[in-house]
Image (cartoon, rainbow, N blue to C red):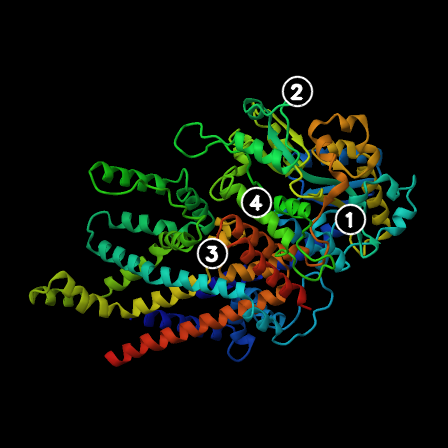
Amino acid sequence: MPHSRWQRCCTLIVIAFLLTLCGGCNLARHNASSTSSKLEIKFWNGFTGPDGQTMAKMVRQFQVENPDVQVNMQIIPWGTYYDKLTLSLAYGGAPDVFILQAARFSEFASFHTIRPLADLYASAQPPLTAKQFAPVPWHESFYQGVQYALPLDTHPIGLYYNTKLFREAGIVDQNGKAKPPTNLTEFLDAAKKLTKDTNGDGQPDQWGFVITNQHSNWLTIAHQFGGDILTPDGKHGAMASAPCLQATQLMVDMIYKYKIAPKPEGVDAWLALRQGKAAMAMEGIYMLASLQEQPGLQFAGAPAPQFGPKQGVWGGSHLLCQPVGISPEHSRAGWRLMRFLSDHSLTWAEGGQVPARLEVKRSPQFTALPVQAQFARQIGYVVYDPQVPRANSLNQFVDPAIEAALLQLQTPEASMTDADRRINQLLARP
Amino acid sequence: MQAEAKALDSGSVSQSLSTRSAAGGRSGGWIGWLFALPHLILFFVFLLGPTVYGFFISLREWHVLAKQHPFVGLANYQAALSDDIFWIALRNTAYFVFLVVPLGNLVSLLLALGLGQVRRLQTFYKVAFYMPVVISIAVVAVLWQWLYNTQVGLLNLYLGTMVNGLRQLGLPLSAFQPIPWLSDPHWTMPSIALMSIWWGAGGNMILYLAGINNIPPDYYEAARIDGANAWQVFKSITWPLLRPTTLFCLVFSVLGAFQIFGQSYVLYGGGAGPGRAGLTLVLYMYQQGFSQYEIGYGAAIAYLLFAIVLAFTAVQFRLLSNREESRS
């Protein structure tokens, strides 16, 4: 008798378990199919910082003006954003509108996962054409001649400098204002004056310069010497080319020869700039809010110094895209949202971006933003990561090679040659 | 004896089940399957299915975003074997196994031997040494990241204080230079190994302790009467009789150590550490499969790791069980 009761009890539990599984499936299906009278648009991005609040404000404004559309914005940290986006594009559940960063754009375009936008541009009222955009981000929205995106902004790196330390070191113009360096000679001269051993222990504790992002700093300097990660045809690695080696050697020299920058290990370089222990850094405009938060920090922005014979500065771009296979209804509503965000990119600029739209960039409100307007001066010569399908995969070789050279684990020649060999291997894969 | 009784008992249960469910058919086995079903479903869906499917994937050029996944035969395996980063990852992983398995087991054994001698507060010590095992590796890594910090880490602080103290006592030591535990490629693997030993030693300690407690006390009594010292007792009684436990612990330590992932992943934020010194095979597989989305290539690396671990385990079993047989 006890056996029978026990048996019945367990059978019930097992059946309940199985029913819960099935019931869960049904419930999920039911939830997915229930819709409200408004057209729902899913919008994904990775703006977890202050820029996310700005974006939320713009989306709210859009909804006020477009009561027939319900925008469900999901902010996913960049660290997991592309995993989620990739899986949704591959296996279903993709958002109707999403942000792609320039460095990842060609990868998604090459697999035909994003919708060509030519028809939407053609039917846009008022029209939206190349003339209204800065050329570099506009060009960026194409892949192999097809336009897949609406560029929202450009975010080049630029020079942040501590104006207080500059004045203390006497690096000022005739008005007594801190004077940022514009070329290599001025840069080295200023950085040497700004590198100090303030507590007398024989080790500098205030640095003229800090390398906060090896990737963007290296690409900036490499382009200024005329180099790039890949050969112009995009088929081979070019990191061991003479211009790239010159750029790498210059960065190595900043640390070990001129001793104006700390070795990039075991130090939080960005924190050093925030805390006034470093006078200069080349960082993205998106880091502006982080410096503004620092109490008592006196800083300003300027275009990145020109170290080599050419102008060039690394930048990224936020591109608004739609997935392939989206319904015409959702696509049109999504385009309205994209168009709205582009038209209102001045609000976006206040969050720390250089808008892609020229009329916004030239507006008095934008030119009044001190750091943004300075960084925007570079917009004509911004350079991106290589636009090849495997651009993202290249970084598994590019960044460690730069690091190995800067930490002197390998000579620049050896580390860059290794990187080229691995890049060639990768690009040769089917 | 106890196990036998249990088996008998469960036998009678199933017998009574089968007689009671006569309506269900000959043996009434279906009800047993019903009970096993939840586990079997999960096992097939989440373990066996993906494992077999993984092999299928490894034979294809498979990018997550691609619509077609053409069959490429063993090309992914070939590519992995000619990829020097795969060999760097394998070398790092082997180095880690070499550091962690012998040292970790030694620490576990010493702890168990020590605990065997403790009469008071034994449970307290057991819990204390076992505690790290139940912490997730993510938490352990974040904790040790602070301990290992070159500038403000506790480890360098203690070492510095110790060296300075010894210098004041007049020992001819040079001034303490902070050790870059995690940012110098030479220190990377030893640091990860030390952290892993701290994390995992308690698990094997419990097993060794159980092994020690299973040795009949008569042997020790006899040894004492014969006047054996502690080392002789260990060498001639404890160590030989612990052999099955040691075999078990070694095999499972090797299995676990080859699969090291979380340590590097958390310490280096998904990267590979300075000069790729923290790159392990599972981490490389993860990067290829889930960062580059080349899951065909990632799956091939996974199967290569599987082959290596299988070979190691087979060799270990053969070596240690042979010795066992020759002894008996």
Residue B92 lies left or right of residue B110; in this view the side is: right
- How far, Cα to Cα, is label 3 from label 1? 36 Å
| Element carrying mark 2 | loop
Tell me the residue at 54%/73% (across/down): B30
Residue matched to label 3: B277
Q: Nearer the viewer, mark 1 or mark 4?
A: 4
Figure quadrant of the C terminus of chain B: bottom left
Q: Position of residue A243 (x, y in %)?
A: 65, 51
Which comes sooner in the sequence, label 4 or label 2? 2
| Element carrying mark 4 | helix
- How far, Cα to Cα, is label 3 from label 2? 51 Å
**Is disc 2 on the same chain as disc 3?**
no
Q: Are marks 4 and 2 in contact (CB under 8 Å)?
A: no
Label 4 marks a residue whose chain is A
Q: Residues within 10 Å of mark 2 (few under 14, many from 20)?
A: few
Q: Residues within 10 Å of mark 4 (few under 14, many from 20)?
A: many
Residue matched to label 4: A251
- How far, Cα to Cα, is label 3 from label 4? 23 Å
Tell me the residue at 74%/34% (across/down): A377
Residue matched to label 1: A140
Q: Amino acid at mark 3?
A: Ala
Label 1 marks a residue whose chain is A
Q: Is residue A24 visible?
A: no
Which comes sooner in the sequence, label 1 or label 2? 1
- How far, Cα to Cα, is label 4 from label 2? 31 Å
Figure quadrant of the N terminus of chain B: bottom left
Residue matched to label 2: A174
Q: Amino acid at mark 1?
A: Glu
